[in-house]
Image (cartoon, rainbow, N blue to C red):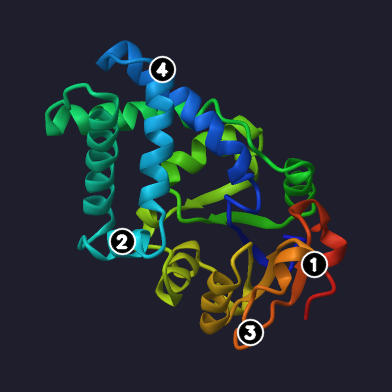
Amino acid sequence: MTGRYVLFLDDGGVISDNDVRAPQWQRMVGQFFAPILGGSAEAWAEANRVVITSFFSPGAWEARMNSTPDYWSFERKYNLDWLADMCQLVGVPTPSEEESVELARRAGAWIVSKVRADFPGAADAIRRLHDAGYILHTASGESSTDLKGYLGATGVLDCFGRLYGPDLVNTHKSGPDYYERIFADAGALPTDALVIDDSHVALSWAVQVGARTVLVTSKQRRSEYSEALPKPCLTVGSLAEVSPELLAGIN
C-alpha cells in the first residue's frame, strides 16, 4: 500500500451534491409509484419533497434515530412512514405493512441506481487516490445498499472496500461509537484512519476516537462552525482538491 492512511469518505456533501440529488429523487419517486399505486407523478414528487423536508426538520431526524433499538428497526419504520405519509398526501390507499416495506425497498434500489449527483471532479479525485494505493471506504449515514447504487452510478464503486453505512455496524452516524465500530470492522487503527466529511461535528466524533480529518466546506460556511470543536487537519473547498500529494503533508 502506497497511501499512508486508510480513507473514510462521507457521501452526501463530499462525493454527492444533495441539492442536485433531491430533485432527481422527487422526479423518480413519481415515476415509480404513480403506475403502481395511482395518482400523478407530479403529486408523488411533491409529496416526497414535503415528507422528506418534514423528516429532516430540526430535531426530527435525531428523534427518529433515537426512537428505535437498532438500525433495522429504524429502516423498517422509516420506509413505512415514508410511504404512508406520501400516500396520504397523494390521496391513495396505503398498502399493507409488508407490501409497503417491499415497495419502498424496490423504489430505493431503482432510484439510487439512476441518480447522478457527484460533485465536479469528485470521481476523478477518488480514482487518483485509489490508483495511488490508498484504501478507501465510505463513512456515511446512508445504508450500504444505497451507497452501492450511488457509487455505481458515479462509476467509482470498484475503488471502495467497505461501504459504511450504519447498517454494516448497526450504529447510527450520530457519535464517536460509529467511527470506533467502522474502524474496527475495517481493521484500521484509529491513528491510521483519515475521515473526509462536510460536517465539522461528525469530524469531531472521529477525532475523539483518534482519527485525522479533512473538512470539505465552502468559504461561506466556514464561519458557521464552533471554535469549540477540534480543527480538522485540512480544510478544502471540494473533494476535487484532495490529492495524494495533499494528503502526504498530513502528520
Q: What amino acid type is highlighted by mark number 3?
A: Pro
Asked if residue 169 is positioned above or below residue 176 in the image, the reply reads above
Which residue reaches farthest right? 245
Q: The disc labelled 4 sits on which kind of residue?
A: Ala
Q: Earlier in the sequence, mark 4 or mark 3?
A: 4
Residue 89 vs residue 129, the one in the foreground:
89
**Could you tell me residue 88's position as x and y percent?**
23, 31
Kindly state the secondary structure of the residue where label 4 is placed. Answer: helix
Looking at the image, is mark 1 or mark 4 nearer the viewer? 4
Query: Residue 117: x and y, percent?
Result: 63, 36
What's the CA distance linking mark 1 and mark 4?
46 Å
The numbered dot on residue 65 is: 2
Helix, strand or loop for disc 2:
helix
* Badge 2 density bin: few <14, some 14–19, many ≥20, Cα 10 Å: some
Which amino acid type is marked by label 2?
A: Met
Residue drawn at point x = 58 percent, y = 56 percent = 10
**Which is closer to the viewer, label 1 or label 3?**
3
Label disc, if present, on residue 247 of the rendered structure? 1
